[in-house]
Image (cartoon, helix red, strand yellow):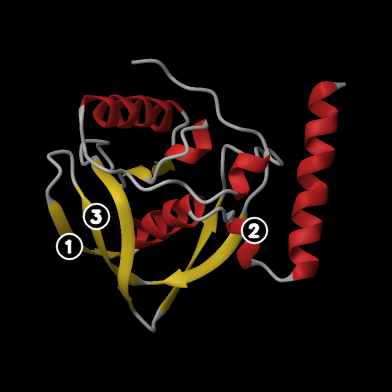
């Protein structure tokens, strides 16, 4: 399957709420395959469909060192979050060249449909929890930098704009 191009911030689709998946079918599985190929080519730990312009509630995550633990999710929804937080440096191919330390719940419970269409409830901890939360944010029209305070967010976006301008010049 092809590696898909990433939307570039500030593409308005990155701010839209992704549409629910009605059923898992061959089209859904093809999207997941494109997403996985694109994620592994980055390389990244997760990808939401909206990042490649597919406006459906689909995400893939693989935080294994061997890159052999891909989880495919349709309509992922967090049902529980730990009070304990975890800081992690986050970035996005939609805003290349910059990153920020984001604090998120250390553990989450997520309900989703898997590649067979079955309902799954799964606990994610540590890096897995961070990546899943990051992808769900994308599906809800949020970027990681939305979790920063206004001053840090402005500085990060200004740095990204400067890098983009240099890249075009």
Question: Residue 38, percent across and down?
Answer: 42, 27
Residue 41 vs residue 1: left or right?
A: right
Report, in whole angstroms, how far the alpha carbon at label 1 lies from the one at label 2: 28 Å
| Quarter of the figure with residue 144 | bottom right
Question: Residue 126, percent across and down?
Answer: 33, 64
Q: Quadrant of the N terminus?
A: top left
Q: Residues within 10 Å of mark 3 (few under 14, many from 20)?
A: many
Q: Secondary structure at mark 3?
A: strand
Of residue 37 and residue 74, the one placed in the foreground of this image is 74
Answer yes or no: do the residues labelled 1 and 2 have beta carbons within 8 Å? no
Between discs 3 and 2, the one toward the N terminus: 3
Between discs 1 and 2, the one toward the N terminus: 1
Q: Which residue is mark 3?
A: 112
Asked if one can make out residue 64 in the rendered structure from this viewpoint, the answer is no
Answer yes or no: do the residues labelled 3 and 1 have beta carbons within 8 Å? no
Q: Of the residues tagged 3 and 2, which is closer to the observer?
A: 3
Residue 150, above or below 113: below
The residue at the point 24 percent across, 29 percent down is 29
| Quarter of the figure with residue 44 | top left
Of residue 35 and residue 151, the one placed in the foreground of this image is 35
Q: Which residue is mark 2?
A: 145
Q: Which residue is mark 1?
A: 121
| Quarter of the figure with residue 167 | top right
């Amino acid at each position: 399957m092809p590696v898909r191009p990433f939307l570039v911030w500030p593409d308005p689709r990155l701010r839209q709420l992704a549409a629910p998946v009605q059923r898992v079918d061959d089209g859904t599985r093809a999207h997941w395959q494109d997403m996985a190929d694109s994620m592994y080519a980055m390389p990244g730990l997760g990808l939401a469909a909206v990042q490649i312009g597919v406006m459906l509630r689909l995400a893939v995550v693989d935080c294994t060192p061997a890159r052999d633990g891909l989880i495919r999710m349709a309509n992922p929804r967090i049902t529980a979050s730990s009070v304990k937080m975890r800081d992690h440096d986050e970035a996005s191919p939609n805003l290349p060249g910059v990153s920020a330390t984001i604090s998120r719940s250390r553990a989450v419970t997520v309900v989703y449909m898997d590649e067979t269409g079955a309902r799954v409830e799964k606990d994610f901890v540590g890096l897995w929890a961070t990546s899943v939360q990051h992808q769900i944010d994308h599906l809800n029209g949020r970027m990681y930098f939305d979790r920063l305070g206004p001053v840090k967010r402005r500085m990060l976006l200004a740095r990204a704009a400067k890098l983009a301008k240099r890249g075009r010049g």
